Image: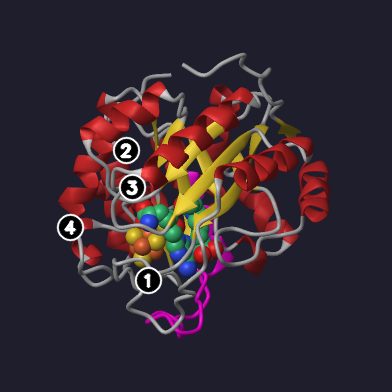
Amino acid sequence: MKLRHDWSREEIQALLTLPLVDLLWQAQAVHRTANPGYHVQLASLLSVKTGGCEEDCSYCPQSMHHASDVAGRPQLAVEPVLERARAARAAGAHRFCMGWAWREIRDGAPFEAMLSMVRGVRELGLEACVTAGMLTGDQAERLAAAGLTAYNHNLDTSPEHYGRIISTRTYQERLETLQRVRSAGIDLCCGGIIGLGEALEDRAGLLQVLACLDPHPESVPINALVAVAGTPLEERPPVDPLELVRMVATARILMPRSRVRLSAGREQLGREAQILCLLAGADSIFYGDTLLTTSNPAVASDRELLQAAGVRVSTAPAPVAAAR
Ligand code: SAM
Ligand code: DTB
Ligand code: SF4
């Protein structure tokens, strides 16, 4: 399958607006070729540093600019984090993702602790993912040396809509961090959110930026806004689940070999809508009762969902003796 990095916005918009049955047919054809076993990766998420973030992302409950901010929670230490990683592995997770509500990583004790967490998670045989805002080239190199599998840094929306959602940093800064992660040899986890009041052209615009990255991000999280009370977007109406299906299907067609992760917002979806997303090419979910600050479907109901859909769960790799 030939991978393309030259998609035009018009082509993407045409995919997004295809009759749903035709879009699903195309997405499935791509997905069945790239992922014939319909393997789904389970990724568990833990907030290591919660709230008090300097950025003003209008969807985010952890920004210090919003009434929703849950400030003053102490940052978790290395051992409790690794305890949670062991529990996630025992529950069947394949990847362990850790979040820090930071604008950027600063050097010092918290960064050293982050490196220890990455090493510890890798020694458990889990993939390790970190999301912690902007980082320098040197920090990216050190995370790579600790064995970090992937760095999550979302573009969230189109370059045009971005300024209406976030004012404290630019799209360009986001792209520069992504480049540093790439240069250090760490996989990219980069996606966005729908339901921010964006137009269809903005959804196409986000997907265009992602699909024109070369190589494509190894994982692409597609979030539906969780409208949290106290954030500027608290009044936004819920997204139509079929819009999410369209977004997943189009991402699958554009980036055949990337993991498309059905991320925040699953609690608002029925079982059938989630199965449509799996059919459309989603091959990863967040697994565990919480996301960062909001809730996620229970582990038992997710097991039932995957069983009902008939997809297979990726098996966790064997533990590595020591991280690099
Ligand atoms: N501070 C880091 C950053 O922004 O990269 C890491 C954490 S941040 C919470 C990770 C991602 O979660 C955001 O980029 C956004 O895409 C997603 N997110 C945050 N709040 C959300 C919400 N209420 N609904 C849906 N997705 C959300
Ligand atoms: C991503 O794209 N979605 C996850 C993960 N990357 C870090 C975060 C979703 C957060 C939803 C709101 C919350 O729980 O605070
Ligand atoms: Fe939330 Fe991350 Fe934005 Fe901070 S940078 S407000 S944690 S999304």
N-terminal label among 1 and 4: 1
Q: Identity of the amino acid at label 3?
A: Leu
Number of the label disc, if any, that sits on residue 170: 4
Q: Position of residue 271 (x, y in %)?
A: 74, 59
N-terminal label among 2 and 1: 1
Number of the label disc, if any, that sits on residue 63: 1
Question: Mark 3 and mark 2 in contact (Cβ < 8 Å)?
Answer: yes
Q: Quadrant of residue 111?
A: top left
Q: Is residue 116 above or below residue 152?
A: above
Badge 1: how crowded within 10 Å, few (<14), some, or many (20+)? many
How far apart are labels 1 and 3 at the CA level?
A: 26 Å
Dot 2 lies on which element?
A: helix
Q: Quadrant of the N terminus?
A: top left
Number of the label disc, if any, that sits on residue 207: 3
Q: Identity of the amino acid at label 2?
A: Ala
Question: Mark 1 and mark 2 in contact (Cβ < 8 Å)?
Answer: no
Ligand 3 has an atom within 8 Å of the beta carbon of the residue at disc 1? yes
How far apart are labels 4 and 2 at the CA level?
A: 20 Å
Q: Identity of the amino acid at label 4?
A: Thr
Q: Is residue 62 above or below residue 125?
A: below
Q: Is residue 145 above or below residue 279?
A: above
Q: Quadrant of residue 89?
A: top right
Q: Position of residue 152 (x, y in %)?
A: 41, 43
Please tell me whether mark 3 or mark 4 is closer to you in this view.
4
Ligand 3 has an atom within 8 Å of the beta carbon of the residue at disc 4? no
Front-most of residues 91 and 204: 91
Ligand 1 has an atom within 8 Å of the beta carbon of the residue at disc 3? no
Dot 1 lies on which element?
A: loop
**Measuring 50% from the left and 33% from the top, which residue is drawn there?**
116
Q: Identity of the amino acid at label 1?
A: Ser
Q: Magenta span has 237?
A: yes
N-terminal label among 3 and 4: 4
